[in-house]
Amino acid sequence: MRKIGVLFLAIIFLFATIGCGNTKVIDGKEYDTYGLLNISDKNPNIEYRTIVGNVIWSIILIETIIFPIYFIGFSLYEPIGIKGNVEKGVVR
C-alpha cells in the first residue's frame, strides 16, 4: 500500500512540474501568455507556442470548470521569440 502512495505522489509531482506558461522578456519588453479569452494580448510580431501541460491539465480537471477556463482562456499560448527568428524545436 505504501508503494502505491509513493507512486501516486510521484505522478502528482510530475504533473505539477508541467503546465503553466512563463512570461518572456524579448528586447527589453515582457510578453505574457494569452488564451482564447484574452486574445487581444497577443502581439503579432511575437511567435507563440501552445502550452501542452495546460491542455493536459484542462482535460484532467474538466469537471472543475474553473481550471479549464483559466488554462484555455488565459494561458494557452506562451511567447518564445520574435517571428521569423525562431528555429523549429529550439527555445531560447
Image (cartoon, rainbow, N blue to C red):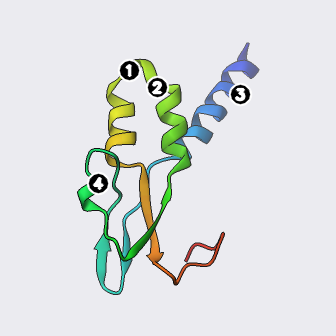
Q: Nearer the viewer, mark 4 or mark 2?
A: 4
**Hey, which quadrant is residue 3 in on the image?**
top right
Identify the amino acid type marked 2: Leu
Q: How far apart are marks 1 and 2 (CA)?
A: 6 Å
- Label 3 environment density (alpha carbons within 10 Å; few <14, some 14–19, many ≥20): few
Question: Does 77 sit above or below residue 62?
Answer: below
Q: Position of residue 45 (x, y in %)?
A: 36, 77
Q: Name the residue under label 2.
A: 61
- Local secondary structure at mark 4: helix
- Label 4 environment density (alpha carbons within 10 Å; few <14, some 14–19, many ≥20): some
Q: How far apart are marks 4 and 3 (CA)?
A: 39 Å
Q: Earlier in the sequence, mark 1 or mark 3?
A: 3
Q: Which mark is residue 7?
A: 3
Q: Distance between the residues labelled 4 and 2?
A: 23 Å
Q: Name the residue under label 1.
A: 64
Identify the amino acid type marked 4: Ile
Q: Mark 4 points at which residue?
A: 39
Q: Earlier in the sequence, mark 4 or mark 1?
A: 4
Q: Nearer the viewer, mark 3 or mark 2?
A: 2
- Local secondary structure at mark 1: helix
